[in-house]
Amino acid sequence: MPQQPINSFLLPKLGEKPTINLVTNPHKFAVCDGVEFLGTSGQNVHDIRLYSKLKDNTSIGIMRLLMEMQHLCPTTPDTLRSFPFRDTDPFTVTQAPHVFFAGC
C-alpha cells in the first residue's frame, strides 16, 4: 500500500478506451460539483477483521471506525504491506469524503 495502478501494458485494449482511468489504491476523486469519493480495494478492511477483536466486525462497522480514526490503513506496515514513508502518512484522512467505499 499504496498500490500503483495496473500497468496499461497488461491490458492494452483497456488502455485505449478514453473513459478508463487507471488509478492507485487507495484513491480519492471528485465528480459533479465537488462530490468527493474515497475508495480502497478492501484489503484494509479485511486486514482489520483478521487481526482485531472489534465488537462490530462488519465491513460497514470497520469502515465507520476508519473514518472516525481518520486513517485508512492503521495496520500498516505491521500486518499489511506498505512502502515506508518518512515525513508524511499517505493514509491519513484530513477531510471526510462524501462517499467512502471499499471493494471485495
Image: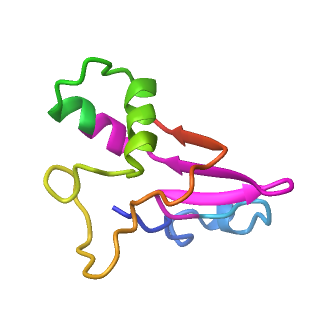
- Picture quarter with the C terminus: top left
The residue nearer to you, when weighing 73 against 10, is 73
Quadrant of the rendered structure where residue 57 is? top left
Residue 28 is left or right of residue 50, and the answer is: right
Figure label count: 0
Q: Is residue 62 magenta?
A: no
- Please tell me which residue is depicted at 76% across the width and 63% down the height of the picture: 17
The residues colored magenta run 23-47
Q: Is residue 36 magenta?
A: yes
Q: Position of residue 68 (x, y in %)?
A: 42, 40
Residue 33 is left or right of residue 35, and the answer is: right
- Please tell me which residue is depicted at 57% across the width and 62% down the height of the picture: 11
- Picture quarter with the N terminus: bottom left
Quadrant of the rendered structure where residue 92 is? bottom left
Q: Position of residue 81 (x, y in %)?
A: 22, 59
The residue nearer to you, when weighing 81 against 8, is 81
Figure check: 56 above or below 97: above
